[in-house]
Image: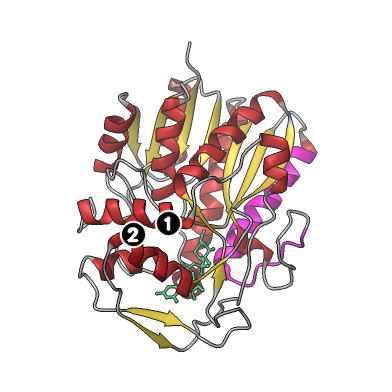
Amino acid sequence: MRQQILVTGGAGYIGSHTCVELLAAGYDLVVVDNFSNSKPAVLDRVAAIAGRAMVWHEGDLRDRGLLQRLFDKHPFAGVLHCAGVKSISEAQQFPLKYYQHNLEASLTLLDVMARHNVRRLVFSSSATVYGEAARVPYREEAPVAPNTVYGRSKAMVEGILHDLVQADPSWRIAILRYFNPVGAHPSGLIGEDPSGAVNNLMPHLCQVAVGRQDELSIFGHDYPTPDGTGVRDYLHVCDMAEGHVKALQHTAGESGLLTLNLGMGRGHSVLEVIRAFEQACGQRIPSRFVARRQGDLASYYADPSRAADILGWRAKRDLLEMCADAWRWQSQNPNGY
Ligand code: WQD
């Protein structure tokens, strides 16, 4: 009998790649997604890659009735909670939206889980919970002190998960703090497809390369980094998806709460990413230095050793592979799904 897992946000960028790995690992999946930043077509592509379909429902996690019906119907072995909204700048403008979709939705989900005696969870958190005070490389014990609404919405859920485990140690929870996931599945069938404004570096590069934008703006050239541009810990989304499967498997045998960084453990500058992307796509990417983006840090990257020690997980795919796979996805799907 295969275990059934509920994946929230399963049609999203990280959710979809994780569904592929979970199906390959032998789980049966039920996806719930409100398709606010994704499309149902994603799930057909996931099924095509995996050779196996999943059940899916369109809906909002704040819809308690929907969740109750799902949990009544399916004997879930656990939940992978990837659903959420994730734009740093939009969150500053619309904090309530962010607390509703990231916090209220999580509370409703956790409550329905507890009432159905499902206490196994993998939660999508973010390296952004560390804030400015932490020293690189970021270790999981570094203080949680986010300086943005988005970061606080994630940190608050982390805090609630800690309280839950404190009150009832039978919960089995893994909190995954993502660094900068990029790339796409090597099939070119699924990848990142932001609707509306594009915020992040890799989707910008992809859109310039396919001609949807004229040039890339490089935010800042005078950071205290080797070439003056921002440094981040980019990791391939398929490595990240494998990390989720290992974290889920780990929660089968261990109660309590585990917090893990998912990163490569090294940084790349914006200029290095541009060079690697140019190599991958075989064209020059027009770019221009502009002012720093408000709120950006100069440089940060993970210490991923805890995930290596506990899960035996390491990100394996290098920057060129990340760029090649991002480019394959974008060039085969110039307008997304
Ligand atoms: C990377 C680097 C930019 C765009 C954000 C969130 C984080 C996580 C991932 C969620 C920086 C520079 C970018 C561009 C540029 N999200 N840049 N021109 O800001 O590290 O992380 O997304 O869960 O929480 O903060 O990622 O890809 O936006 O930026 O020069 O057009 O690229 O300044 O140095 P970031 P990013």
Residue identified by numbered label 2: 280
- Circle 1 residues within 10 Å: few <14, some 14–19, many ≥20: some
Seen in the image, is 90 located left or right of residue 330? right
Residue identified by numbered label 1: 320
Q: How many marks?
A: 2
Is the magenta region chiefly helix, strand or loop?
helix
Does residue 153 appear in this view? yes
Seen in the image, is 135 located left or right of residue 178? right
- Between 53 and 218, the residue placed more toward the observer is 218
Q: Residue at x 28, y 51 (%)?
A: 329
Farthest residue to the top: give it.
Answer: 1
- Asked if 299 appears above or below 60 in the picture, the reply is below
| Residue 79 screen position, x and y as percent | 53, 33
| Residue 234 screen position, x and y as percent | 52, 59
- Marks 2,1: beta carbons within 8 A: yes
In reply to whether residue 187 is colored magenta, the answer given is: no
| Residue 67 screen position, x and y as percent | 46, 34
User: Which numbered circle lies on residue 85?
Assistant: none
Q: SS of the residue at dot 2? A: helix
Q: CA distance from mark 2 to mark 1?
A: 7 Å
Query: Hey, which quadrant is residue 170 in on the image?
Result: top right
Q: Amino acid at mark 2?
A: Ala
Q: Amino acid at mark 1?
A: Leu
Query: Which residues make up the magenta segment?
Result: 142-166
Q: Residue at x 39, y 38 (%)?
A: 32
